[in-house]
Image (cartoon, grey):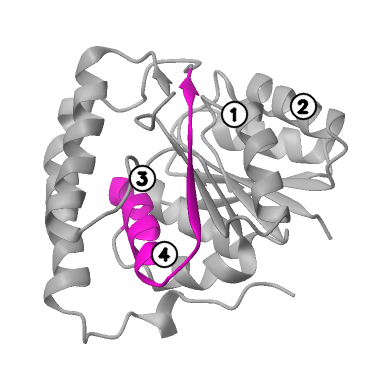
Amino acid sequence: MPDVSVVIPVHDEGAILRTACLDLAQGLSARGLNYEVVLCENGSRDATRAELASLAAEHPRLRWLSIAEPNYGLALREGILEARGRLVVCDEIDLCDLSFYDRALPLLESGGAEMVVGSKRAPGAQDRRPRHRRLATWAHNTMLRLLLGFRGTDTHGPKAMLRERLAPVAGRCQVDRDVFASELVIRAQREGVRMVEIPLTLRERRPPSVGLWRRVPSVLARVAKLVWVLRLAPSRAPPAAEGERAPPA
């Protein structure tokens, strides 16, 4: 059984998938970690699934699952629930910054945190994305603070967590796509999870697969749903029977 599960959603990533996975595996092995990489394919139309099958056949520490629709949040949720490691790292295929692992995993091991969030806006962070994307990150997190009382600087960076503590939280989340990560962090915060933010130096391997302005209406609609779920309808029970699963033994 692995000690660390790395969960990565992938959608139409055939161009960078092999290089990114091999680089990540090499870095994890060099650190002496007992790990698995869980790649969560969602609705790809390119060669991603064929590449995943090939990689999994070559590398026993890599496994993958697939869902039919392009849905980042659903893929990430399913990956967290499928993870077998005591520690889970949620990463992005175009980032895979091992310096985050070097800082986050010891915080979990030492008991200093139950969840570590990599922030693009924390003091000391270096966000080298285009200005309009940095502005969008600020706007999104400002909405979360004003509407939902979010206490932090970012919800969408890489995350490391104790599986036993956070998998049930992921199972209770009700909003998918781009806003799942925000619900996971805010719900964990509200449930008393001990959380630490650490600053990121952000270097992407390629531009985002979906343009920012195409995502705005969907994000706004899901933030509105998140406000309803967390503020306006707190007595509604989450659909545990349909989606929540106990973490694997």
Magenta stretch: residue 190 in it? yes
Q: Residue at x 44, y 23 (%)?
A: 124
- Relative vertical location of residue 16 with respect to residue 122 in this rendering, above or below: above
Q: Position of residue 179 (x, y in %)?
A: 29, 50
Magenta stretch: residue 162 in it? no
- Relative vertical location of residue 29 with respect to residue 5 in this rendering, above or below: above
Q: Disc 1 to disc 3, how far (Cα)?
A: 17 Å
Q: Disc 4 to disc 2, how far (Cα)?
A: 29 Å
Q: Amino acid at mark 1?
A: Cys
Region in magenta: 176-202
Q: Nearer the viewer, residue 221 or 203?
A: 203
Q: Which residue is mark 3?
A: 155
Question: Which secondary structure lies at badge 4?
Answer: helix
Q: Which residue is mark 4?
A: 188
Mark 3 Cα within 10 Å, few/some/many (few <14, many 20+)?
Answer: many
Q: Position of residue 97 (x, y in %)?
A: 60, 26
Q: Position of residue 3 (x, y in %)?
A: 79, 55
